[in-house]
Image: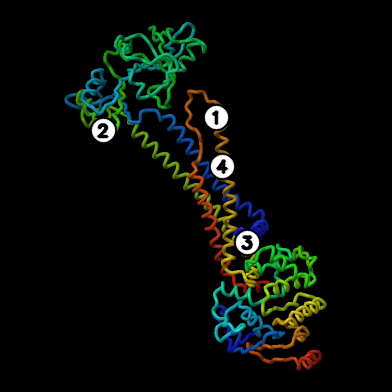
């Protein structure tokens, strides 16, 4: 699904160049449930931005679903994002003057699907996430967990192949966090690839594979079988 | 473009900053309002003036004598001279391009006191001596009776044609003045007609307040010999009156032994030239109107551009989210441009309508308050042409697009990643 080879990315900060990703290799298969961890400055946000085609990279190759993602113009990037990727953000990023249903339907608006049809589909997705009766509420009238569920519905509605979640539980309390993780797990069980960035070990431990970044390269990959050991290690730390 | 969501978004963007949106819209509104009102007022002035002069023979020129300005052939500078009746026939014979030529003499009401008496009524009016052709150069409506004719001239009849104001002050409104007598400077004249001027041009006093005698009668009763104070000519169709004007001056100067280079001895006014000047003036007013109007409009447009920039700044994150979930740059640009065009067009259209409405109102008020018929109206029918209205609408849409340009390109510079990072 995702194949990254020798990825380099640096940022220009005035006269200084900050080399963030230094020859990163990464393979993610379809249907995986992966978390990316790392201390701040390890390059995890940069990696997520490149994965989400929100940012370009300097060197290397990035194949998404067999397609080379390189030097796309804004229009192509937008179309690819719309088609392939669903985003979930830490701060939900719902549009404040649109109600839940309209927010969920937004990606379909960009696909030029008629208003009636996309609202109907949006209602189905909200129903699936147990928010049907909140469909006509504005984001400001929803709780944090509800907002994130609306955002998840929005990420799912365009039927992307990958869900990218940037600290999806960062703004939620632990009970709600668990709830959101359960939903993400369900989505993954239905066959979608889910990649999330987090710095919380217990959240990461709920995924099936943990990729630890350090100084722009992958330091460690912890797979299914070793997760238990990881959990134990975390709890003793 | 006519998607409900899109309009919803426009509405939300503008409604979020009601006061600012309103103030900005007011800038554009005011710009177009001023443009329309000024253009309309300019047009009204033009209408008023041209209506007042339209019927006046445009190809006419007028001459009168003054002291000579140059010594010539033994005559000293500053000599008094005058044209005479023979000059009229002389010019007629020598300049075939002349269509009408008529002399006109005056006695003023200056010298004090009233000069016209009828019973217990008296008044002070200009007295003029005219030929029948004069009315063809400076048209007047004959309200009652007739104008001076050839027989009056030949027989030096003691008759007079009076202006409307003269009738009003010397007669009772229901009286028939025709056949009645007026005593003018001690001599009785029979009234043969009442006239109303059709133009606002006046030559030695307004026609309404004047009494016209046959030219020959005036020469005799006022003991003027064959003096001609004033002369009016019109050129035949197709001949510029300025050519005739020059020719007349040349011949008259020669005949009366005046230096050819003397510019002041025979003075003249060329209506053609005056009209041209007037047209130039109106053109100037129009150009000024557009410069000021478009300047004001531009200020409004800059305001719109400014508010759009602020809106985009505030919506950076929102735009970033929209792009992250698949909005193409084109969608964002067209959204912003449309917002800008809507803001300018709606407010501008309002300004246009209210401006036109105001002009209409002025029109109505002016129509309903009948100005005394003879008073000069220098302001008639203020209006803007459809061309002006349409072109200002066009300018508006263009201005809206222009105003949206900078904000839209600013929005395009927002990378989704930057927008989302901005917490």
Q: Secondary structure at mark 3?
A: helix
Label 3 resides on the chain identified as B
Question: Which corner quadrant of the image does residue B205 belong to?
Answer: top left
Q: Are marks 4 and 3 on the same chain?
A: yes
Q: Earlier in the sequence, mark 2 or mark 3?
A: 2
Find residue B243 and name its label.
2
Q: Earlier in the sequence, mark 1 or mark 4?
A: 4
Rounded to the nearest whole Å, what is the CA distance between mark 4 and mark 2?
A: 45 Å
* Residue A196 shows up from this direction: no
Identify the residue under disc 3. B311
Q: Residue B398: percent from the left, percent from the top? A: 51, 55
Instruction: State the colouring used for the structure image.
Output: rainbow
For the residues labelled 1 and 3, say whether their Cβ atoms are less than 8 Å apart. Answer: no
Horizontal arrangement in the rendering, residue B309 relative to residue A164 (left or right): left
Q: Are marks 1 and 3 on the same chain?
A: yes
Identify the residue under disc 4. B355
Quadrant holding the C terminus of chain B: bottom right
Sort mark 3 into few (<14), some (14-19) or many (20+) by Cα contacts within 10 Å.
some
Rounded to the nearest whole Å, what is the CA distance between mark 1 and mark 2?
A: 42 Å
């Amino acid at each position: 699904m995702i194949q990254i080879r020798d990825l380099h990315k640096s940022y220009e900060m005035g006269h200084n160049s900050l080399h963030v990703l230094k020859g990163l290799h990464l393979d993610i298969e379809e249907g995986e449930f992966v978390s990316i961890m790392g201390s701040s400055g390890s390059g995890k946000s940069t990696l997520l931005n490149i994965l989400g085609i929100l940012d370009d990279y300097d060197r290397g190759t990035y194949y998404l679903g067999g397609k080379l993602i390189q030097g796309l113009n804004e229009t192509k990037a937008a179309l690819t994002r719309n088609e392939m990727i669903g985003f979930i953000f830490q701060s939900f990023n719902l549009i404040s003057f649109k109600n839940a249903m309209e927010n969920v339907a937004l990606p379909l608006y960009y696909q030029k699907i008629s208003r009636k049809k996309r609202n109907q589909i949006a209602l189905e997705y909200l129903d699936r996430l147990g928010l049907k009766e909140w469909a006509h509420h504005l984001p400001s009238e929803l709780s944090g967990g509800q907002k994130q569920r609306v955002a998840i519905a929005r990420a799912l509605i365009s039927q992307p192949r990958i869900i990218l979640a940037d600290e999806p539980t960062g703004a939620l309390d632990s009970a709600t966090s668990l709830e959101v993780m359960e939903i993400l797990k369900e989505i993954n069980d239905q066959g979608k690839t889910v990649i999330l960035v987090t710095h919380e070990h217990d959240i990461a431990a709920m995924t099936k594979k943990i990729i630890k970044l350090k100084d722009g390269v992958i330091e460690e990959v912890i797979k299914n079988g070793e997760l238990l050991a990881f959990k134990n290690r975390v709890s003793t730390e | 473009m006519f998607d409900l969501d899109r309009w919803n978004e426009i509405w939300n963007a503008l409604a979020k900053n009601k006061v600012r949106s309103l103030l900005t819209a007011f800038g554009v509104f005011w710009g177009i309002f001023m443009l329309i009102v000024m253009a309309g007022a300019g047009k009204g002035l033009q209408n008023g003036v041209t209506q007042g002069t339209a019927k006046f023979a445009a190809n006419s020129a007028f001459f009168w004598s003054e002291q000579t300005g140059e010594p010539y052939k033994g005559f000293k500078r500053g000599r008094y001279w005058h044209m005479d009746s023979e000059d009229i026939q002389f010019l007629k014979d020598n300049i075939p391009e002349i269509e009408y030529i008529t002399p006109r003499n005056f006695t003023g009401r200056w010298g004090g006191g009233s000069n016209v008496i009828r019973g217990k009524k008296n008044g002070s009016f200009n007295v003029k001596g005219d030929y029948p052709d004069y009315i063809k150069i400076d048209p007047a409506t004959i309200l009652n009776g007739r104008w001076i004719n050839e027989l009056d001239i030949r027989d030096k009849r003691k008759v007079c044609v009076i202006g409307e104001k003269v009738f009003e002050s010397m007669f009772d409104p229901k009286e028939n003045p025709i056949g009645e007598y007026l005593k003018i400077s001690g001599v009785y004249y029979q009234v043969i007609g009442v006239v109303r001027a059709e133009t606002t041009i006046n030559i030695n006093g307004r026609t309404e307040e004047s009494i016209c005698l046959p030219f020959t009668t005036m020469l005799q009763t006022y003991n003027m010999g064959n003096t001609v104070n004033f002369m009016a000519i019109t050129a035949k169709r197709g001949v510029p009156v300025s050519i005739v004007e020059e020719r007349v001056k040349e011949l008259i100067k020669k005949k009366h032994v005046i230096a050819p280079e003397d510019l002041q001895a025979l003075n003249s006014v060329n209506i053609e030239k005056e009209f041209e000047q007037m047209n130039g003036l109106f053109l100037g007013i129009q150009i000024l109107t557009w410069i000021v109007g478009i300047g004001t409009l531009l200020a409004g447009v800059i305001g719109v551009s400014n508010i759009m920039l602020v809106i985009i700044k505030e919506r950076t994150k929102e735009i970033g989210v929209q792009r992250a979930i698949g909005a193409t740059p084109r969608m964002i640009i067209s959204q912003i441009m449309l917002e800008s065009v809507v803001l300018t067009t709606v407010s501008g259209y309002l300004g246009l309508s209210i401006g036109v409405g105001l002009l209409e109102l002025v029109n109505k008020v002016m129509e309903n308050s009948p100005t005394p018929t003879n008073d000069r109206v220098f302001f008639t029918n203020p209006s803007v042409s459809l061309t002006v209205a349409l072109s200002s609408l066009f300018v508006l849409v263009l201005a809206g697009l222009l105003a949206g340009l900078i904000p839209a390109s600013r929005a395009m510079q927002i990378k989704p990643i930057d927008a989302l990072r901005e917490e």
